Image (cartoon, grey):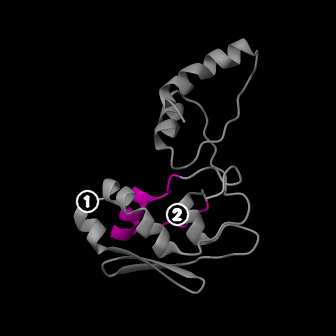
Amino acid sequence: AGSRSALVEAVPLLLDAAKLKEIVMSVLGSDRELSYLLSRRGLALEPTPIEGTHGLLNLPGLMRDMRQYLAARLPRADLRRLSFGQQGDTCTFRLAHERLDLDALQAASASRAARLVFGSPEAPSVGGELGRVLTAIFPLPMPMPGFNAV
């Protein structure tokens, strides 16, 4: 929370004041502004996989609840052609005739669908128009897993 630029400007001051060689912090994949500002300063960013078990119990319901967020990130034409489904343990992402099916639940780790939706270096790569649209909306902004209940 707060000003990303103020945080980035404070890093050298914190290092100096505390006589530290490095600061390690976690940045959510959805925080594109902070990631951009840190990388522009030459600070190393190391993507890490999602820790713990994360699955999607109701992808269509989640995306319905995120409709305003989707509308802010996508042109109306893309939003009209985009749909989400879930049948059993399979999440479906669809844009017109393009379709992607991913597992929704996986024991003891993040499912492939959760990696895509919440962000992970292990997220599946998606090509085509569907990939372009999914890249614009994912990863979803969310509290850090384990820090808050969502």
Quadrant the N terminus occupies = top right
**Mark 1 touching mark 2, by CB under 8 A?**
no
- Which residue corresponds to the image point at 72% horizontal and 67% vertical from the top-left? 109
Mark nearer the N terminus (1 vs 2)? 1
Describe the element under mark 2 as helix, strand or loop: helix
Q: Furthest-top residue in view? A: 17
User: Amino acid under label 1?
Assistant: Pro
Q: Say whether residue 126 is magenta.
A: yes
Q: Is residue 48 visible?
A: yes
Q: What residue sits right under mark 1 in the picture?
A: 75
Q: Residue at x 54, y 21 (%)?
A: 9
Which amino acid, by three-letter code, is at mark 2?
Val
State left or right for residue 67 relative to residue 124. Answer: left
What segment is highlighted magenta in the picture? 122-141
What numbered label is drawn on residue 117? 2
Q: Examine the image and state in which quarter residue 99 appears.
A: bottom left
